[in-house]
Image (cartoon, rainbow, N blue to C red):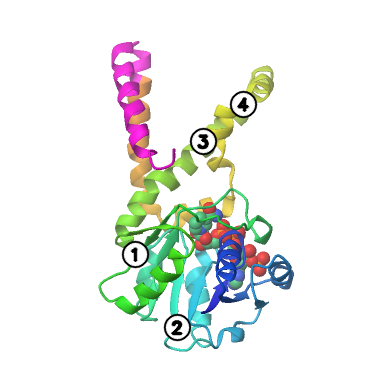
């Protein structure tokens, strides 16, 4: 197939590497000429340009720009694409994107590959990033079945596990398991970094090991991505943060009251709940 990828960063570049390997003709579009050249030399695209007119024969286009640029990118793109072209995006928030694009382009299927890294840009792109990872599609009742099938067939070639839900359900679920962790992990880093006692601060830094590396990883990632999550998934994220704060308050209360029995009950039930939540990952 002739596949366009707009936004040649971590996700766009990684998609290009895998789709090109599958024998597709991958046409990359990015904002900066330097990125275009790097994508070509890394083998992530068959050809690439900063000019969208290269996409005039594209059968499918993946929009892989940062969240805030997805809708403006679509608005620029439509002048260059055949009307049969199926467009999808990879944005980590779905409701505002699906609401804005579906009325403008019929063959649009919202998507979100649940794979990534804290690095960004074309240098961070890698093969097999999506293999065995969830890939969520959020079609709505006006999305043509034929468009869904085209995207399903393509992303299946990445070895992903496809899931379907509404854009709203998607946003609530990712606010819990993706956006909330970014914010709580960020607060953890702030708490450590703002420790007023310089001796304790230095020691904490020296003692930090694998546990801190795990718990601080998502909070220390791409700041632009974190702001976009909060901006575009504000309502669901606020709801998750309020629930989290109330659970944290409960822990504070139990520790203040020295209620070790109740604390143990909570930690015991968390121990079991975590195994269920991450069972597919282990
Ligand atoms: P990224 O590494 O920063 O890549 C985005 C790329 O888009 C940049 O390399 C930039 O290329 C290009 N770009 C920026 N503005 C553009 C524009 N107006 N037109 C064309 N290209 C433009 O970001 P990413 O992590 O791949 O994220 C891209 C999308 O994937 C986001 O919508 C995000 O929500 C979603 N996502 C991210 C992850 C993750 O873990 N990172 C996971 C799943 C989904 P230039 O160098 O040319 O400016």
Residue 81 location, x and y as percent?
A: 50, 86
Pick out the residue farthest to the left: 141
Residue bearing mark 2:
85
Mark 1 packing: few (<14 Cα in 10 Å), some, or many (20+)?
many
Residue bearing mark 3:
187
Residue 26 location, x and y as percent?
A: 59, 75
Q: Earlier in the sequence, mark 1 or mark 4?
A: 1
Q: Are marks 1 and 2 in contact (CB under 8 Å)?
A: no
Q: Nearer the viewer, residue 148 or 50?
A: 148
What are the residue bounds of the magenta stretch? 253-282
* Residue drawn at the location 51% of the way across and 36% of the way down: 187
Query: Against 90, is 226 above or below?
Result: above
Residue 41 location, x and y as percent?
A: 74, 68
Q: Do the residues labelled 1 and 4 touch (CB within 8 Å)?
A: no
Q: Which numbered disc, 1 or 3, marks the residue closer to the eye?
A: 1
Q: Distance between the residues labelled 3 and 4?
A: 18 Å
Query: Against 207, is 261 above or below?
Result: above
Q: Is mark 4 on a helix, strand or loop?
A: loop
Q: How far apart are marks 2 and 4 (CA)?
A: 49 Å
Write down the quadrant of residue 193 in the picture: top right
């Amino acid at each position: 197939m002739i596949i366009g990828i707009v936004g040649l960063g971590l996700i766009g570049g990684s998609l290009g590497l895998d789709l090109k390997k599958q024998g597709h003709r991958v046409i990359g579009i990015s904002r900066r000429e330097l990125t275009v050249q790097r994508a070509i030399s890394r083998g992530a695209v068959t050809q690439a340009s900063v000019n969208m007119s290269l996409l005039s024969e594209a059968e499918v286009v993946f929009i892989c720009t940062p969240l805030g640029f997805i809708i403006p990118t679509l608005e620029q793109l439509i002048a260059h694409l055949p009307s049969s072209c199926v467009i999808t995006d990879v944005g980590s928030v779905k409701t505002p994107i699906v609401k804005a694009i579906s009325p403008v382009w019929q063959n649009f299927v919202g998507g979100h590959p649940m794979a990534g890294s804290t690095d960004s840009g074309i240098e961070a792109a890698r093969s097999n990033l999506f293999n065995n990872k969830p890939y969520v599609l959020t079609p709505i009742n006006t999305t043509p079945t034929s468009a869904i099938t085209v995207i399903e067939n393509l992303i299946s070639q990445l070895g992903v596990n496809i899931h379907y839900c509404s854009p709203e359900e998607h946003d609530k679920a990712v606010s819990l398991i993706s956006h909330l962790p970014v914010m709580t992990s960020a607060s953890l880093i702030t708490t450590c970094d703002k420790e007023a006692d310089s001796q304790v601060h230095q020691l904490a830094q020296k003692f930090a090991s694998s546990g801190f590396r795990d718990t601080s990883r998502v909070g220390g990632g791409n700041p632009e991505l974190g702001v976009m999550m909060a901006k575009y998934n504000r309502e669901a994220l606020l709801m998750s943060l309020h629930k989290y704060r109330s659970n944290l308050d409960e822990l504070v209360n139990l520790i203040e009251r020295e209620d070790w029995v109740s604390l143990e009950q909570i930690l015991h039930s968390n121990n079991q709940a975590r195994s269920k939540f991450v069972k597919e990952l282990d």
